[in-house]
Amino acid sequence: MTQIRGIYAAGMSIFKDNLSLDVDKTIEHSEKLIQMGCHGVAIFGSTGQAQLISISEKIDLLNKLSTNENKSKFLVGTGLNSLSDTINLMQISCSLGLNKFLVMPPAYYKYQDEGAINFYTKIINQIPECKIILYNFEKLCGYKFSVKCVETLASKFPKQIIGVKDSTYNLFRELKIKNFSIFPGSELKLLSGLEIGCAGIITATCNATAELSRKVFDDFEKKKTQTANEKLCKVRKVFDQFNLISGLHSFLGKKNKIYKNLLPPLNLLNEKDEKKLLEDLSKLDFN
């Protein structure tokens, strides 16, 4: 039995007009996603603009989240390159009862598997109570996990390395590790992933597709005929035409202005792209 399973949204962060993190509205957004069918939410992932948010603001949100009735359903992203900052944030999170993490290895510098293994080893030696989902996203951080590296980490730390989010898609078909949660990073891989033993998905567009994604998951679990997967995949392909963060904030911002603030250098879609996004989604009867 995998330790974590289901539909997880890579949660969006909400910002005030002065671009400070709106802790309450960010948590409220995540709660709505859970109500709409997500088994959980990964906060402070790439979709949540984690690399652009200050550590102090992250700690403020974790303090508030620690009292939330859904706290067990959250994965905490770190979004930090510094090893010491990553350890510090994770220690604070664990002290608040939030011990499940989505951790991407550092960006910018070039390194191989040995460097990645050393990075996670240092973390786990300091925080043995943590549960880590590895975040494989070469496009963003420059490093791509190999199958061997993941197998090594899972074997070395079976209690701490409990899964992987695979947004590079070189792992989810190849990894065969007992009691290990594998999450492709797109709805396009949800059904095919479940069919080969994946645990579900962790994906940005579940901020919009939570209900459809949950139906595909539940129908698979109940061995029912799939009726939502085709539409789910078409919706994802529409969003994939654009930067996902910009597209999601533009889409949700049409109904609620709280989504219209992004941290520079990120922007909302331009008028032409927003029009195409909304028209293409309308053709799919997706609102």
Image: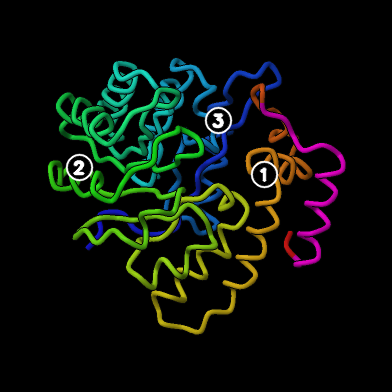
Q: Which residue is mark 1?
A: 248
Badge 1 element: helix
- How are the colours assigned in the image? rainbow
Q: Which mark is residue 153?
A: 2
Badge 2 element: helix
Labels 1, 2: front one: 2
Please give the count of numbered marks on the rendered protein: 3
Q: Earlier in the sequence, mark 1 or mark 3?
A: 3
Going by the numbered disc 2, the residue's amino acid type is: Leu
**Magenta region includes residue 276:** yes
Direction from residue 182 to residue 41 in the image, left or right: right
Going by the numbered disc 3, the residue's amino acid type is: Gln
Direction from residue 111 to residue 153 in the image, left or right: left
Q: Which mark is residue 49?
A: 3
Between marks 1 and 2, how big is the CA–CA gap?
A: 34 Å
Q: Residue at x 45, y 15 (%)?
A: 56
Disc 2 packing (10 Å; few <14; some 14–19; many ≥20): some
Direction from residue 209 to residue 140 in the image, left or right: left
Between marks 2 and 3, how big is the CA–CA gap?
A: 27 Å
Q: Residue at x 25, y 26 (%)?
A: 95
Residue 241 point in image, percent of width and height: 70, 50
Q: Nearer the viewer, residue 144 or 185?
A: 144
Q: Earlier in the sequence, mark 1 or mark 2?
A: 2
Q: Residue at x 22, y 63 (%)?
A: 1
Between marks 1 and 3, how big is the CA–CA gap?
A: 12 Å
Residue 238 position by quadrant: bottom right
Residue numbers of the magenta segment: 266-285
Badge 3 element: loop
Q: Residue at x 33, y 37 (%)?
A: 101
Q: Nearer the viewer, residue 120 or 146?
A: 146
